[in-house]
Image (spheres, rainbow, N blue to C red):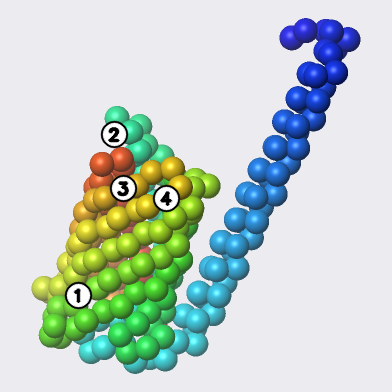
Amino acid sequence: MPPLFAKNRSADNHDNKSADCKSADCKSADCKSDLSLVALIVCLFVLLIAPKTANAGFSYTHLELGYGYVDNDGNGNGDGGPYGALSAQVKKRMHIFSEYQAAGDGFVLGVGGNLPVDKKLDLVGRLGWADLAGADGVRAEAGFRLRAGSEINGGLFFWNLDTRSDTGVYIGAVATIQGPVALTGRLRFSDHATQANFGLRLHF
């Protein structure tokens, strides 16, 4: 590192600008963190007061906590951490949802709709605002929920972020343990990442 006295005025100005940029980045990150926290609180509040009018086949009001793993480069050296999701049915065929994945620093807040085909099959669509490691954008999903003893679900998803877009498929299962408590698991495969979530779901 050059001696302090060797810095000229131009270098000092560059350092000051760099410091200002870092400060602005920190403020931006703080704002996103605050927004994510507020969104989670709002979604939890709605979940608690949501009307218990889920269709006879499937519940769309639940809390899910577990472990998530994300491998972004496909070499098997991914990252893992806590995972959480909230969903609250606000109308007969409409729900809001929120998801947070510590691995990959991903957050999604959105709205979904379901179309019952019969008591054992729902078609489901979701659209949400997403923040993935500081890149903003949207995530869309189209899939199904099928009850065949336990629940099997799957479909297609699409990310469109500031820095990239991604398309893939997902498949999952929900197995009731007792009453409102169930085990859940979901795998996502896309061009850029592989993701796995496993946890417990509590239906309300």
Label 3: how many residues lie within 10 Å, few (<14), some (14-19) or many (20+)? some
* Percent of width and height locating residue 92: 32, 89
Distance from disc 1 to disc 4, alpha carbons, whole Å, reads 25 Å
Residue 77: x and y in percent read 35, 32
Cα gap from disc 3 to disc 4, whole angstroms: 9 Å
Q: Which mark is nearer the camera, 1 or 4? A: 4
Q: Disc 3 or disc 2, which is closer to the eye?
A: 3
Most foreground residue, 8 or 107: 8
- What is the secondary structure assignment of the residue under circle 3? strand
At 75% from the left and 32% from the top, the residue drawn is: 17
Residue occupied by mark 3: 166
Q: For the residue marked with disc 1, what is the amino acid?
A: Leu
Question: Which residue is drawn at the image coordinates 84% and 13% (left, top)?
Answer: 8
Instruction: Calculate the distance from the C-alpha at mark 1 to the C-alpha at mark 3.
Output: 22 Å
SS assignment at label 4 = strand
Residue 74's tag is: 2
Q: Using the rendered view, name the quadrant where residue 10 is placed.
A: top right
